[in-house]
Structure formats: structure tokens, C-alpha cells
Amino acid sequence: MSSAGTPTLHLGLNQWLPNDKPERVDFNSDNKKIDAFFNSKANLTSANFTVLKRGGYGVWDAGNLPVETGTFTPYLYGETASGTITYTHQLGWYYRIGKYIGIWIRFRVASIITAPSGGLSIRGLPFVVSATGYANVLNLSHTTVLSDRSYVTQGMIYDASRIILSKGSRWDNLVLGNNLTSNWELNGSGFYLTT
């Protein structure tokens, strides 16, 4: 006996009314519909979905949505002379969803053995950067003052392997390595796209 109530909208399952007397065949019929529904979803690929995109980059990677977390070891680097720096804190965490990489970085300089020079950048990123050209990717929550009495305000992608540090809203107002001091600290987080 099928139910006298209106079947469910999507799967057409029985909806029993108080006076209905369901039989085993009715339950078996509903179970087959549920099983067929889940079987049709068992082998989903990106072809079954609208691929999420941002700036032409898909989130899906060969039909999968990779989600991954981990740590990395970022380091400060002078673009003219790299310098030799020791750290009290040198931490990096990442969260990857498809091609989007979320990062959180924390540095505290213990000592400067050889001073870096030129623009100061962050290297050691967990994944290669796909889009370059001075896109702001690092929002800084805390930095201490540099020797020239200025603060780092943002980090921008420069090329596939580094984030350059800037003292203003312009990419060319670089933080210079020779302004780095012992006990200098930076905390920041941001997102970028990988290949």
C-alpha cells in the first residue's frame, strides 16, 4: 500500500498519514530510491559541478578539491645581499583549498650576523605563486618599528617564490634590509594562488 500522503519532492518517497498501513514492499521501494540516489553521487567529478573560479583560476584540480594544512619555514632575505639572520621565532602555517593558499607568518629576529641589503622579502613559501605583479597578499597584524622609525605595512607578491615587504600602499616603498634590527617582529596572514 503506497501512502495516501503527497510523496517527497525530490526522491518521491512515501509520506505516511496517521491511518496508512505501510507494507514491507513500500519500505523496500523507498530504500531502492534512496540507494539509487546515493549511487548516482558516488563517483562525482568536477564535470558535475560549476567550477569555482577567481581571475580565471579553477579551484578544482583534476576533479578533486585538495584541502591540506601544514607548516613551513619562511625566512627574511635581502634582495641585493641576502644576509644571515637568526630567529627567536620563525613560523609559518598554511591552509590549502584547491589553488588558494592561506598563510600565517610570524618572525622575531634574534640577531643579525650579516646585514641584508636591498629590498627585504619573505621566502620559503609553501607553494609556488601563480600570479605575480605586486598583488597585496599579506596583511600584517603586528610589526615592530624598523631602525628608520617606520613600520612594515604590507607584503606583496613579486614573483613565484617571494613576498616583498612594503612600508606603504606602493610596491616601490620597499623595506630595506639595512633597516632590520634585532628583536624586530612581524606577524601577518594572507592568501595567494598557486599553480
Image: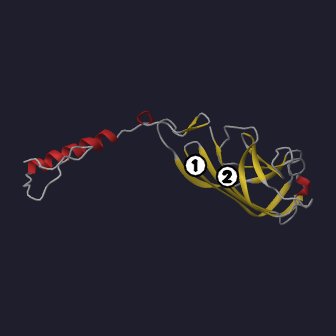
Residue 114 visible to the viewer:
no
Q: Tag 1 or tag 2, which sits nearer the N-term?
A: 1
Question: Residue 66, image x and y in percent?
Answer: 51, 45
**75 left or right of 129?**
right
Circle 2 — which element? strand
Question: What residue appears at the point 59 percent right and 55 percent down from the top-left corner?
Answer: 70
Could you tell me residue 40's position as x and y percent?
30, 39
Q: Amino acid at mark 2?
A: Gly
Task: Tell me, for residue 96, which label it has, or none.
Answer: 1
Whole-angstrom CA distance, mark 2 to mark 1, is 12 Å
Q: How many marks?
A: 2
Judged left or right of residue 190, residue 16 is: left
In the image, residue 168 above or below residue 183:
above
Q: Give the residue at x 10% y 47%.
A: 2
Q: Mark number for residue 61?
A: none
Q: Nearer the viewer, mark 2 or mark 1?
A: 2
Q: Is residue 176 left or right of residue 21?
A: right
State the image quarter where residue 133 is shown: top right
Q: Which of 58/109 is in front?
A: 58
Query: Whole-percent x and y of residue 126?
Result: 65, 48
- In the displayed structure, 149 sits above or below 61; it is below
- Residue 20 appears at what percent x and percent y? 8, 55
Which of the two residues, 146 or 12, is positioned nearer the viewer here? 12
Q: Which residue is mark 2?
A: 190
